[in-house]
């Protein structure tokens, strides 16, 4: 948590920013371009976003707020994709007496939050060029956003690309698709490329392919436990899950790159990538990324950076709040 020596009574104008995901909410209070307080909340402990804001605020008078929310935003209302919350800008304005509340897509905020100070890891050194960029982020869900270049500036555009149909690449993934179709009307990329997606890959290997179970039950399976068992205990099934997950990640990242023609570079965000840096470097991601017939040479020239800052979307949310 960041603090300064000012008391709330000394503050003339305060901005509120938040990154509201499927699992957690990161919320910050800003004055004079500085974050003076920041907190993280687990969404499962609250009925709605208003409860979190109420707990966070300490009788401060908020001038403006910008809330980055994981889901489609229609008329400043968002029915969140992986959480049963409905977030309304108007309701929050009225409840907390804020003059202006803006909702933006969390991936758009993520894109706005990328700047020179953003910590990244270069997964592939391409040729840095002007041109549109792309951002993909696997976490609780799967976020994708094109960042178009108009010749002067970069413009992120809200997208729900993580919900397009999963495209299997071989017989194993065709079998995975059939397995998941028993439970899902539609198998999207998010179904296989997210925290829940990692669990789905694990369940498939156990139930359909006869792989040995890890030390936890199927009911207890989570992305965190799979990563831990693979990296710290060398569980062969969990290691297979991570390897496969990275390959799917590379394939879908290339899909987005080609759709956007992201010659300006690709960013990988979200909470999962920093946890599996070693696995992303082992080759499966890049092998799948380059495996596009006729496009391999183009893709090899594209720079790929993994974002290591976990508060990038919060920073982007504040940037939008301050500028607009």
Image (cartoon, rainbow, N blue to C red):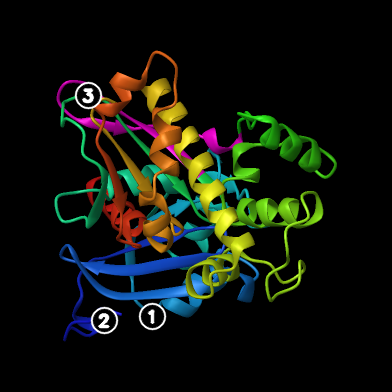
Which label is found at residue 8? 2
Quarter assignment of residue 133: top left
Q: Residue sitting at 15 percent across and 65 percent down? A: 32
In the displayed structure, 63 sits above or below 255; it is: below
Q: Tell whether 197 sits left or right of 58.
A: right
Dot 2 and dot 1 residues touching (CB under 8 Å)? yes
Decide: few, some or many residues near mark 2? Use Cα within 10 Å; few <14, some 14-19, many ≥20: some
Residue 12 at x, y percent in the picture: 20, 70
**Is 146 one of the magenta-colored residues?**
yes
Q: Residue sitting at 44 percent across and 47 percent down? A: 137
Q: Residue furthest right?
A: 182
Which label is found at residue 59? 1
Residue 171 at x, y percent in the picture: 69, 31
Q: Which residue is mark 3?
A: 131
Quarter assignment of residue 212: bottom right
Residue 16 at x, y percent in the picture: 34, 64
Decide: few, some or many residues near mark 3? Use Cα within 10 Å; few <14, some 14-19, many ≥20: some
Q: Circle 2 sits in a helix, a strand or a loop, which is it?
A: helix
Q: Tell whether 146 sits left or right of 177.
A: left
Residue 287 at x, y percent in the picture: 41, 35
Q: Which residues are magenta?
A: 143-163
Which label is found at residue 18? none
How far apart marks 2 and 1 lie (CA) works out to 8 Å
Dot 2 and dot 3 residues touching (CB under 8 Å)? no
| Labels 1 and 3: the sequence-earlier one | 1
Q: Tell whether 149 sits left or right of 235.
A: left
**Is 304 one of the magenta-colored residues?**
no
| Labels 2 and 3: the sequence-earlier one | 2
| Labels 2 and 1: the sequence-earlier one | 2
Instruction: Return the residue nearer the eye: 212 or 8.
Output: 212
């Amino acid at each position: 948590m960041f603090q300064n020596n000012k008391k709330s009574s000394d503050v003339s104008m305060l901005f509120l920013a938040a990154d509201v995901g499927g699992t957690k909410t990161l919320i910050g209070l800003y004055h004079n371009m500085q974050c003076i307080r920041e907190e993280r909340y687990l969404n499962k402990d609250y009925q709605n976003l208003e409860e979190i804001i109420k707990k966070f605020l300490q009788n401060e008078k908020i001038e403006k707020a910008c809330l980055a929310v994981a889901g489609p935003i229609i008329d400043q209302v968002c029915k969140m994709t992986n959480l049963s919350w409905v977030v309304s800008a108007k309701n929050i304005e009225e409840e907390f007496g804020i003059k202006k509340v803006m909702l933006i897509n969390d991936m758009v905020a993520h894109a706005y939050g990328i700047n020179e100070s953003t910590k990244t890891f270069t997964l592939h050194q391409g040729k840095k060029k002007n041109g549109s960029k792309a951002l993909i982020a696997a976490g609780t869900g799967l976020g994708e956003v094109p960042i178009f270049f108009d010749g002067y500036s970069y413009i992120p555009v809200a997208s729900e690309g993580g919900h397009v149909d999963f495209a299997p690449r071989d017989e194993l993934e065709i079998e995975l698709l059939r397995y998941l179709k028993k439970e899902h009307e539609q198998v999207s990329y998010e179904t296989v490329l997210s925290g829940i997606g990692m669990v789905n890959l694990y369940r498939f290997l156990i139930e359909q392919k006869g792989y040995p179970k890890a030390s936890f039950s199927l009911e207890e399976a989570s992305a965190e436990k799979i990563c831990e068992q693979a990296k710290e205990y060398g569980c062969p099934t969990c290691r297979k899950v991570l390897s496969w997950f990275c390959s799917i990640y590379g394939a879908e990242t290339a899909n987005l790159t080609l759709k956007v023609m992201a010659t300006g570079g690709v960013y990988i965000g979200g909470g999962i990538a920093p946890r599996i840096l070693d696995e992303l470097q082992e080759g499966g991601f890049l092998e799948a990324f380059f495996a596009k017939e006729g496009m391999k040479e183009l893709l090899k020239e594209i720079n790929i950076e993994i974002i290591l800052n976990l508060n990038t979307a919060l920073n982007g949310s504040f940037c939008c709040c301050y500028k607009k």
